[in-house]
Amino acid sequence: MRSPIQFVVLWELLDFTAAAVQLDFKVERSSTARSRLKPRGYLESPIENAQDALLYLIPVTIGSPPQSVMLQVDTGSNELWFPYKESTECTRNNTECTEGTFDPSASDTYRTVAKGKFGIPYADTTNITGDYFTDSLGLGQQTIEGMVMGLSKVSQIPKGLQSVPFEGIIGVGPKARSETFNGTHLSIAQQMKKQGLIATESYSLWLNGVESSTGSILWGAVDKSKYEGELVALPIQPDPDFGEITQDTVVTLDNVGIINKNNATILAKGLKTAVVPDSGSTSLSLPKDLYLATAEAAGVLTDDSLAGGYLPCDSAQKFDDEGAALTFGFGNADGPVIKVPISQLLRPFAPGDLAGTNIKNDTPICQWNVGPVADGSSDYILGDSFMRSAYFVYDFDNKILAIAQTVFNATGEPDIEEITGSDIPGVTSTATGNYREPTPSKAITSPINVNGSLVGTGTFSTSVGPTMPLLPSFTGAASVIQPPSASFIGLMATGLTLASGVSGMLMVLL
């Protein structure tokens, strides 16, 4: 989640020696045994793929005696906070705070640090306020002492979100020193390093596939069994809105393409666009022209009565059979490329979501988890629909994000190595490349032109053969998102130019 404003207080913390920690994501809620030993090593925490892949939760305990709570893992913020047991959200009904709350009156070790000074506004216009406090935090097999956290006592939640579960958040983004109220406190990774649980301010993130129920976060180390190919480092870039590194891990997106078993093409190259991989967001938010290009490539359907695109859910298997995927290249033209199976970008609609629309749900319908940014915005987000396909290593000490292609449902023997210095174990190269100053997205008011002519209504195919569609036609669909009438092979031969609002560049299919 992008949260541009945060209020922080100064808090002195105890000093210990260095080490490393690993945490795994698990579906079932379980009590977490804790130890006050501080061995050098790693800590692995279970992560739950919750609410049909809408978010990822990690089990923690808080207080003495420990109270069990599940927190949402958010790479796009850096605060750790809990819902207050007596807050309006948690007392209004039984559906909002189902993942646990914190009752400070039941903890012998709770202490208020700054009353009324905690507050975070999020991009979905949620705003939470409350107190900063310190207490014993249980994470995996370890106890973290002296951690300054937030207690959400008052929340302003958009009307459409008031009936959805209300979880606390464990923000794992970089800590920006400029985000201070009258000083600063440490992020979770910084506190673990200070206490001696990990040697560096670092962690690895493995979300696993959309159909999987488990993932993991590994503090202070890398598990080489969770990725394939090369692990490549990307310099973390300054946030375009602030000119410095903030809680958002910004990297440079250079190109986007589409592939299947037999063909590959580039939808956009030389983008040099600032993007944020963000596990606190579900969808990909792209420049509008790039969004249209990806939707065309996948044959996404639209209807005026429904926000966003959709596809038949059974198309996921057809995409997988064809090896159909979007590709995202980072840093520069020779940088790392992450292949995202198109099936990973589909999510079933929840019951009732299609009520009041024109969509006939004779065949189960899935949402297309890619969308355009709002007019005037340049906040380009790669949510967990993208992040599931990559293995991420965050090294904030050295301002590096290393990425590699994930291994879904990895079953190999763990191959874990600590991050102890200036080099991330397993990194083979660094892909440098700075982004250009972003150009805010503008509304598209006319169809995209293909070689000077208006786009037709055919299906963009990545299959072999000039007229073979990747997907069967779907009855009841109101329209397809501006698909080019040329076949995939024809486009590879002739090229397709799309006018783009991204950094003033052109997107070219080659």
Image (cartoon, grey):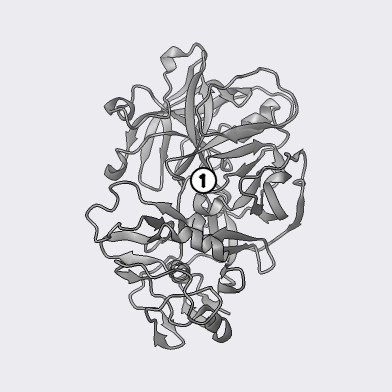
Side (left or right) of 458 relative to 337:
left
Circle 1 Cα neighbour tier, 10 Å, few/some/many (<14 / 14–19 / ≥20): many
Would you say residue 187 is visible in this rendering? no
Side (left or right) of 145 relative to 124:
right
Q: Quadrant of residue 464?
A: bottom right
Q: Name the residue under label 1.
A: 76
In the rendered image, the quadrant that contains the C terminus is bottom right
- Residue 462 spot, x, y in % from top left: 53, 73
Residue at the image position 37 percent from the left and 62 percent from the top:
309
Query: Is residue 140 depicted above or below 402 in this figure?
Result: above
Q: Nearer the viewer, residue 474 or 157?
A: 474
Query: Is residue 477 depicted above or below 210 in this figure?
Result: below
Which residue ends up furthest to the top in the rendered image? 108
Query: Is residue 199 depicted above or below 133 in this figure?
Result: below
Q: Which amino acid does label 1 sit on?
A: Gly
Would you say residue 308 is visible in this rendering? yes
- Residue 448 spot, x, y in % from top left: 40, 79
At mark 1, the secondary structure is loop
Residue at the image position 45 percent from the left and 50 percent from the top:
282
- Residue 286 spot, x, y in % from top left: 46, 62
Q: Nearer the viewer, residue 402 or 316?
A: 316
Side (left or right) of 221 relative to 265:
right
